[in-house]
Amino acid sequence: MIEQLLEYDTKLFLFLNKLGSPTWDNLWLVITHEATFVPLYAILLFLLYKKFGLKALLVFVVLVALMITFTDQITNVFKRGFQRPRPCGEVDLIDHIRFIAVRCGKYGFFSGHSSNSMAAAVFAGLMLRPYYKNLIFILLFWSAVVAYSRIYVGVHYPLDIFCGLTFGAIAGFLFYKLANYLLVRFKAI
């Protein structure tokens, strides 16, 4: 059963990865780079400050730092626990994929980019939903694009992405609930 699922996962990865072309490679390398979306995070923090104030912003900054650390470390626990090689690290696949990433890394289950971007999207989208109703959909789309970039550059299977997005959504929701509790507890709103 697991072998069949992994076989389908590999086939879907090969299909999606081969959709790329040299024309778009630089765009996807920019999208997959961690520093690319720092301006987006700054805008989201500004919107949180604008709607909730300075005291709440301090709570948000601490929580977001904890949330990203949490998702990142749990991702590493899963990677070391499952030890599933990345597609770019598979000897049988390397001649059949478009590997354009800067480096490969050892293990890939599950994707840290996917979990971190989804956690940030869910957290910020839910916090700002009363003020910007459609922002959460834009952020979810952004997270999906970041997640797909990992397949495009050849470093993650679709199952890595799906599990990363799922874990990130759960983490983002839990930290959203924690933020609401702390804002009331510390009278930050």
Image: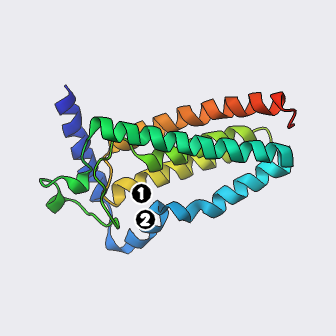
What is the CA distance from the residue labelled 1 to the residue labelled 2?
6 Å
Q: Is residue 15 left or right of residue 153?
A: left
Mark 1 closeness class: few <14, some 14–19, many ≥20 residues within 10 Å = many
Q: Residue shown at 61%/30% (left/top)?
A: 174
Quadrant location, the N terminus: top left
Which image quarter: residue 128? top right
Name the foreground residue: 46 vs 159.
46
Q: Is residue 134 left or right of residue 9?
A: right
In the picture of the structure, the residue carrying the numbered disc 1 is 149
The amino acid type, in three-letter code, at marker 2 is Trp
Which image quarter: residue 187? top right
Instruction: Look at the image and tell me whether residue 134 can be seen.
Output: no
Where residue 3 appears, x then y in whole percent? 17, 32
What mark, if any, has residue 28 been given in the picture? 2
Q: Is residue 185 left or right of residue 148?
A: right
Considering the numbered disc 1 on the image, is that residue within a helix, a strand or a loop?
A: helix
Report the coloring of the rendering. Answer: rainbow
